[in-house]
């Protein structure tokens, strides 16, 4: 029988979690589901947990944030356990690598560079260091290293931000707004032509330019869309509540009634903020 002392030691910290994952992945005594997983099958859960962390922060739910951070940490432990099994890396090498990176990227804190510089200069220095790191990885192109697995809207934002650093950018947001009008017209044209493939392309172009507008306005497009989603949910639930007071559900209603209730919920929110 394995020694469960560490497993049940609530004060053992990260070593306890590492042992739990090792045991879950044990090919003879572990959990069948955990044993079957690989990097690709776990990656979607990793992304989901990161967004649940962001959601808890948006809602300022600190108790839930603690749990979500634990779930995200578990994802790191899961990947490092699989990496160790395959002989690629282990938890300690991952910790060492990120620690080395943070020290190297903050010479003004851990080295002999002066801290007396603006946030803009520190950002420029950070990007210069990252460019050197990419060069060491044979990533010579400006857009190299922008992760393919990022959500498309966030990746568009990062690609444009990277291109802007080398001068490929409009001088101000007014040019982006003009481009949005142009892309909207092209989307309408593709729709009117009933060309689905072309419409999809133009729709993508419009989203791409919208991400660029967000960057020019200092807005995180992913965060903005998450808040818009949350607002829609909140207001639609308000519509459902008002319908329930009338003994109805959305399927018993129609667009005119629901739109009227939507505006009532919207006005109530504005009044509460005033």
Image: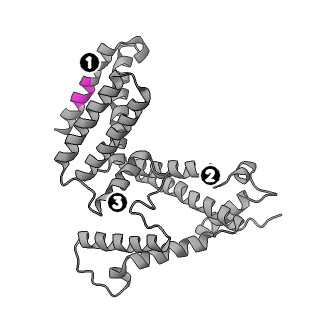
Q: Position of residue 149 (x, y in %)?
A: 50, 51
Q: Is residue 28 left or right of residue 153?
A: right
Q: Nearer the viewer, mark 2 or mark 3?
A: 3
Q: Nearer the viewer, mark 2 or mark 1?
A: 2
Compute the Cα span from label 2 to label 1.
46 Å
Colour setup of the view: one colour
- Circle 3 packing at 10 Å, graded few (<14), some (14-19), many (20+), is some
Quarter of the image holding residue 186?
A: top left
Query: What residue is at 50 percent from the left and 71 percent from the top?
Result: 137
Query: What residue is at 45 percent from the left and 52 percent from the top?
Result: 53
Residue at label 3? 162
SS at mark 2 in the image: helix
* Cβ atoms under marks 1 and 3 closer than 8 Å: no
Badge 2 or badge 1: first in the primary sequence: 2
For the C terminus, give its image quadrant: top left
Q: Which residues are magenta?
A: 263-268
Compute the Cα span from label 1 to label 3.
44 Å
Residue at label 1? 260
Query: What residue is at 53 percent from the left and 74 percent from the top?
Result: 97
Residue at label 2? 40
Badge 2 or badge 3: first in the primary sequence: 2
- Circle 2 packing at 10 Å, graded few (<14), some (14-19), many (20+), is few
Compute the Cα span from label 2 to label 3.
27 Å
Q: Main secondary structure of the magenta part?
A: helix
SS at mark 3 in the image: helix
Instruction: Say above or below: 102 vs 250.
Output: below
Decide whether residue 231 is among the magenta residues: no
Badge 1 or badge 3: first in the primary sequence: 3
Nearest the camera: 58 or 248?
58
């Amino acid at each position: 029988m394995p020694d469960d002392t560490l497993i049940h030691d609530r004060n053992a910290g990260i070593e306890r979690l590492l042992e739990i994952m090792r045991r879950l992945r044990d090919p003879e005594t572990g959990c069948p589901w955990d044993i079957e997983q690989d990097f690709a099958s776990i990656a979607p859960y990793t992304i989901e947990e990161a967004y649940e962390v962001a959601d808890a922060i948006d809602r300022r739910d600190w108790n839930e944030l603690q749990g979500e951070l634990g779930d995200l940490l578990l994802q790191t432990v899961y990947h490092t356990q699989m990496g160790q099994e395959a002989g690629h890396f282990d938890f300690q090498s991952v910790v060492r690598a990120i620690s080395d990176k943070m020290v190297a990227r903050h010479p003004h804190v851990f080295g002999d560079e002066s801290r007396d510089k603006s946030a803009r200069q520190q950002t420029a220095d950070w990007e210069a260091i990252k460019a050197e790191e990419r060069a060491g990885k044979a990533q010579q192109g400006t857009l190299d290293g922008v992760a393919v697995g990022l959500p498309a809207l966030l990746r568009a934002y990062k690609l444009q931000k990277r291109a802007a650093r080398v001068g490929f950018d409009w001088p101000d947001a007014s040019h982006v707004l003009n481009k949005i009008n142009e892309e909207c017209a092209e989307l309408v044209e593709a729709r009117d032509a009933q060309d689905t493939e072309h419409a999809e392309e133009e729709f993508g172009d419009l989203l791409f330019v919208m991400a660029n507008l967000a960057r020019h306005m200092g807005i995180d497009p992913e965060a903005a869309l998450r808040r818009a989603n949350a607002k829609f949910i909140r207001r639609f639930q308000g519509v459902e509540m008002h319908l329930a007071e009338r003994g109805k559900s959305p399927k018993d209603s129609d667009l005119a009634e629901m739109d009227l209730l939507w505006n009532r919920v919207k006005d109530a929110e504005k009044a509460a903020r005033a």
